[in-house]
Image: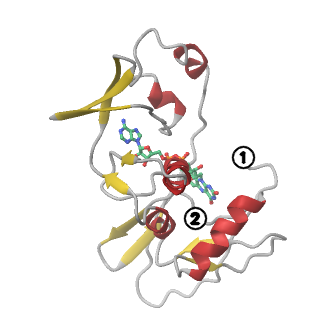
Amino acid sequence: MAGLTCARELMQRGVDVVVFDKGRGLGGRMATRRAGGGFQFDHGAQYLTAQGDGFSAMLKRAEAAGALARWPQDREEPTFVGVPGMTSLAKYLGIGLSIRKETRIEGIVKANGRWKLVWEGGNETFDRVVITAPAPQIGALLPDAHHFNVPLGTVRMTPCLTLMVGLHHGVKLPFVSRHEPDDC
Ligand SMILES: Cc1cc2nc3c(=O)[nH]c(=O)nc-3n(C[C@H](O)[C@H](O)[C@H](O)COP(=O)(O)OP(=O)(O)OC[C@H]3O[C@@H](n4cnc5c(N)ncnc54)[C@H](O)[C@@H]3O)c2cc1C
């Protein structure tokens, strides 16, 4: 979400942008997985709400384009889900962008005032680099002496776990969504 949003904003301002992602599909932690038996799980983010006007407007545009639908919840703010899965929003944000999937950046090296991205079997040099990988993964990409390394080393992430369960044959359960007020 962060990388695609940034890339879209830059593209709309006339910047020539290339997005690299190590994943097979787009979306990162906004992820959809299919499993045998016809199951599909949104095993990262399950729904979206907007706190700010800009994000809210983007969600409504994605809804109009058919990438999102409203999900009735007893929350004050509108709640959206990707259709048919959460990765649909990432695909929507990726429209028109130059995207290299399945390309894991292994290092970022400064060369003559520019930045060389290095991946298995290739490299390419750019004027500017925006990194939106999770903070603890960024240190391994930057040069050892980079001034971001100290603050990045202080970032601690807490886990968010998903259990994926598929039920066969006529098990009728009410749909339940539980939200703890002190959830992060
Ligand atoms: C189980 C779970 C449930 C969640 N539920 C919700 C929810 O209900 N609602 C909600 O709003 N949020 C939820 N979240 C949080 C939400 O998913 C994340 O905050 C959001 O998706 C993070 O987006 P991001 O762009 O910052 O990072 P990411 O989605 O992690 O994107 C980072 C991208 O960088 C790529 N990348 C990393 N390293 C490299 C590399 N070396 N080279 C190339 N590419 C690289 C990855 O492939 C990935 O696509 C949940 C998260 C989890 C894990």
Q: Is residue 131 above or below residue 175?
A: above
Residue at position x 49%, y 50% from top? 7
Image mark for residue 160: none
Q: Secondary structure at mark 1?
A: loop
* CB atoms of marks 1 and 2 within 8 Å: no
Q: How is the image coloured?
A: secondary structure
Image mark for residue 46: 2
Tell me if the residue at label 1 has its CB under 8 Å from ligand 1.
no
| Residue 80 point in image, percent of width and height | 65, 72
Residue at position x 47%, y 38% from top? 133
Say whether residue 14 is visible.
Answer: yes
Image mark for residue 184: 1
Query: For residue 99, what is the image quadrant?
Result: bottom left
* Residue farthest to the right, as pictured: 76
* Residue farthest to the top, as pictured: 145
Of residue 177 and residue 117, the one placed in the foreground of this image is: 117
Within 10 Å of the Cα at label 2, are there few (<14), some (14-19), or many (20+) other Cα atoms? some
- Identified by mark 1, the residue type is Cys
- Identified by mark 2, the residue type is Gln
| Residue 130 point in image, percent of width and height | 49, 36
Residue at position x 47%, y 70% from top? 88
| Residue 167 point in image, percent of width and height | 45, 78
Q: Secondary structure at mark 2?
A: loop
Residue at position x 35%, y 69% from top? 34
Tell me if the residue at label 2 has its CB under 8 Å from ligand 1.
yes
Within 10 Å of the Cα at label 1, are there few (<14), some (14-19), or many (20+) other Cα atoms? few
Of residue 83 and residue 72, the one placed in the foreground of this image is: 83
Of residue 159 and residue 102, the one placed in the foreground of this image is: 102
